[in-house]
Amino acid sequence: MPELKKPVLTTAYKPHPTEKMKAAVWTGTKSIELGVVPKPTITAPKDAIVAVTHCTICGSDLHMYSGDLNEVMEKGMIMGHEAIGIVEDIGREVKHLAIGDRVIILPIIACGSCFYCKRKEFSLCDKTNPSKELEKMYGHRLSGIFGYSMITGGYPGDQAEYCRVPNADLTCVKAPKNIPAKKLVGLCDVTPTAWHGNELAEVGEGDVVGVWGCGAVGLSIQRLAKLRGASKVYAVDKDEHRLNIAKSFGMIPVNVKEHDSPADYILSVEPHGLDRGIEASGFRSTNSVAHSTMRALGVEGDSSDTAAAVIKATRKGGNVALIGDFFFNTNNFPIGMLMEKAITLRGGQLYAQKYFPELLNMVVEGKYDPSFMFTHEDDFENISKNYDAFFHHKVPGGLKVCLATAFGRSQK
């Protein structure tokens, strides 16, 4: 894994000198504490301050929690990139939001005017991330992201009672006040990420699709694949409870524990192969002794176990999408199989802004309900124990928790 040096925080953030708020702050490996920190204020004319009503913990937050990104974290950094709330204040150049609006805060912070934003590839934005370290690693910078380490801009996250939202007209989506909170929190990140996976894989009518991973994102990919017309969706995981959830939604479960090679099993029942394969299990997922050992020894940062299985199970000329948030390097990647089978491989963080208002309209019209992913509800003040439960796969119901702030609870 490449050595990462802590960059200098250059993101504009000037807290109010007297007002305070509660926030989930990173204090070290497996340590997220509910801290009392300065409340943010407007620092740029396109900013908005949002009073958070509900938020949740993302699987990718566990990269920071587990210690995988310690080198690029700052003690006291506010976590989180999935929240909704009410606009409390706006900068003088905010045109499409008003105080009192209910909004979804999207995770991607984009400028809206650079080469990539004009192509609606918002997570590739050139202007919102000052990290030189990321540019050195990848050759380019990516967009800023809320609460997601210094190499994505060092932006304070929205697992907090208030959040400063840069470029708020683009980063916030106005939402109806009569839609249940869990539906809207599900639209912050998981649903657009799942839609992005389907877009990258080009899932369409009649396709046979395989999705590795049955967490909230994987299950959402599966359900949206069906909504887009997929004829069959194979759900691959090692967690029996999650596989049963997938089965209840009409997917075909494939239990990794029951098959030495899930790819070979899929090919035994689908000799033609999958039309579209999607990896949504994450870079911490290892299924072989070789990759577990290499991860433990630090000679690779990610594992290609699941990516290799997806590529093998996908038909010649098919499409593979990587959504599992790979970050570093991996060994034994099947580059020959990928090339010789003429498979198109794509990945990347979600183009969140691109998929709205379409996704919101789907929910408002009753065509899709993302609230299924929240199998537990709790108070925001209990976020520390919920991080521990999420990390150890002990969230009641097995998926995600929806956390309500004191302000959110007062809105009922």
Image: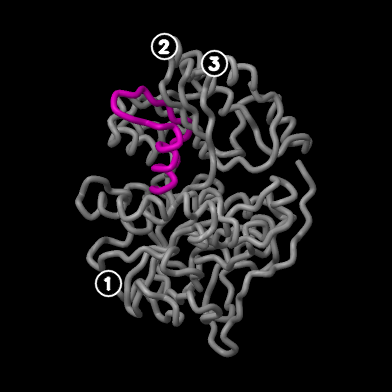
**Tag nearer the camera, 1 or 3:** 3
Picture quadrant where residue 131 is located: bottom right
Measuring from the top left, give residue 245's x and y in whole percent.
35, 36
Earlier residue among tags 2 and 3? 2
Q: Is residue 207 magenta?
A: yes
Residue visible at 57% across and 62% down in the picture? 147
Q: Is residue 131 above or below residue 22?
A: above
- The stretch of residues the image draws in magenta is 191-215
Q: What amino acid is labelled 2 in the image?
A: His
Q: Position of residue 114 (x, y in %)?
A: 54, 58
> 10 Å neighbourhood of mark 2: few (<14), some, or many (≥20)?
some
Residue 100 sits above or below residue 241 on the image: below
Q: Is residue 19 left or right of residue 120?
A: right
Q: Is 140 drawn above or below residue 260 in the view shown?
A: below
From the image, which quarter does the N terminus lie in? top right
Q: CA distance from mark 1 to mark 3?
A: 54 Å
Judging depth in this view, the residue of 265 and 132 nearest the camera is 132
The label number, if any, that marks residue 222 in the structure image? none
Mark 2 residue element: loop
Q: Position of residue 149 (x, y in %)?
A: 64, 59
Q: Secondary structure at mark 1?
A: loop
Residue 341's label in the rendered image is 3
Q: Residue at x 53, y 18 (%)?
A: 342
| Residue annotated with mark 1 | 412
Earlier-in-chain disc, 1 versus 2: 2
> Where is mark 2, residue-wise?
272
